[in-house]
Image: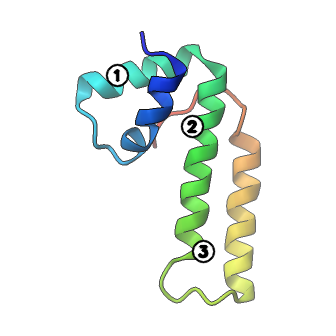
Amino acid sequence: MLNCRDFAEQADALIDEELGPWQAMRLRLHLSACKGCARFFEQLRLTRRLSEAATAPGTDGDDGETARIDALLAAARGGVGGGAGGDG
């Protein structure tokens, strides 16, 4: 089984779907057993979504963009730490 350091080093590749089926399964298995890595993975996914929202074409810091980022944060607050995460 993977250790937490190995998981952290490959978490981006799991999000980006760059792993083969066996590697992805090993990481998901670790996620199901390790609450700390599950929280880390959800935070990493949230950071990615927020970064993408903040740098999306047409983003100029208007009120609509602020509302979209606030909605992402609100949704994530309900999910982070709520158990093992997937990649979808």
Residue 20 picture location, percent across and down? 23, 32
State the mark number for residue 54. 3
Residue that protrudes farthest toward the left in the picture: 20
Depth order, front residue of 10/75 = 10
Q: How is the image coloured?
A: rainbow
Quarter of the picture containing the N terminus is: top left
Q: Which residue is mark 2?
A: 41
Residue 73 picture location, percent across and down? 73, 58
| Residue at figure coordinates x 61%, y 63% from the top left | 50
Q: Are marks 1 and 2 in contact (CB under 8 Å)?
A: no
State the mark number for residue 25. 1
| Residue at figure coordinates x 72%, y 64% from the top left | 71
**Category of crowding for the residue at label 1, using alpha-carbon neighbours closer than 10 angstroms: few (below 14), some (14–19), many (at least 20):** few
Residue 13 picture location, percent across and down? 36, 42
Q: From this view, report whether residue 54 is shown above or below residue 36.
A: below
Q: Amino acid at mark 3?
A: Ala
Between discs 1 and 2, the one toward the N terminus: 1
| For residue 33, side relative to residue 10 (left or right) | right
- Distance (Cα) linking label 3 and label 2: 20 Å
**Category of crowding for the residue at label 2, using alpha-carbon neighbours closer than 10 angstroms: few (below 14), some (14–19), many (at least 20):** many
Local secondary structure at mark 1? helix
Q: Are marks 3 and 2 in contact (CB under 8 Å)?
A: no
- Distance (Cα) linking label 1 and label 2: 15 Å
Q: Amino acid at mark 1?
A: Met
Q: Amino acid at mark 2?
A: Phe
Q: From this view, report whether residue 40 is shown above or below residue 66.
A: above
- Distance (Cα) linking label 3 and label 1: 31 Å
**Category of crowding for the residue at label 3, using alpha-carbon neighbours closer than 10 angstroms: few (below 14), some (14–19), many (at least 20):** some
Residue 48 picture location, percent across and down? 54, 57
